[in-house]
Amino acid sequence: MFTIDILFWILIIGCFILSFVGLLYPIIPSVLVIWAGVGIYHFGINSNEISWITVTMLVILTILLFLADYLANQHFVEKAGATQWGNRAAAIGLIVGSFVIPPFGVIIIPFAFVLIAEMLQKKSFQESFKVAFATFIAFLSGTLAKAVVQLIMIIVFFVDVAI
């Protein structure tokens, strides 16, 4: 029994580490990987130990994580004057960038796609560059916010399990 618990803990910690890798590789659904770690604990180690307060906090933090990412992107990109094509280019660039020159592709490719998309919308190079740079700042701020929320989620889990 003890050996299987160690295996489950290795999987749980692996999930939590993988969630942070997902910050640079958006193809990895970070928050779902955290929930997978919590699920491994619940179904593999102790199904009675995680409190409803912790589950509620994790749900709220999950919602906050999605809101932080969305609002950071909206704030910086809209403030810079992005067009719908620029927003779409950023999303496509993020997906493509996950596979091209990882992990730097998630920064370089969306930047380039937005720059090109905005220039195709008849914006000047300076205006297009401003929007592309705002996309870069949005990615960084959203990633930082997600990292903080993910860390809080993991701490909430460990505090509940330790008490």
Image: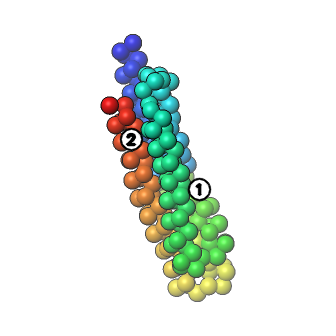
| Residue labelled with disc 2 | 156
Q: Is residue 24 visible?
A: no
Q: Position of residue 112 (x, y in %)?
A: 55, 70
Relative to 56, residue 107 above or below:
below
Q: Is residue 143 visible?
A: yes
Which amino acid, by three-letter code, is at mark 1? Ile
Give the Cα distance between marks 1 and 2: 30 Å
Report the residue at 60% width, 62% height from top.
91
Q: Residue furthest front?
A: 53
Report the residue at 41% width, 58% height from top.
144
Badge number at residue 67: none
Relative to 96, residue 126 above or below:
below
Q: Secondary structure at mark 2?
A: helix
Which amino acid, by three-letter code, is at mark 2? Val
Badge number at residue 95: 1
Q: Residue furthest left?
A: 162
Q: Position of residue 24 (x, y in %)?
A: 46, 53
Q: Nearer the viewer, residue 89 or 51?
A: 51
Q: Residue furthest top?
A: 1
Q: Quadrant of the C terminus?
A: top left
Q: Nearer the viewer, residue 146 or 98?
A: 146
Q: Is residue 116 left or right of residue 50?
A: right
Report the residue at 39% width, 20% height from top.
5
Q: Position of residue 20 (x, y in %)?
A: 42, 47
Which circle, 1 or 2, is nearer the viewer? 2
Report the residue at 45% width, 38% height from top.
53
Q: Nearer the viewer, residue 119 or 41?
A: 41
Mark 2: give few (<14), some (14-19) or many (20+) Cα within 10 Å: some
Image color mode: rainbow
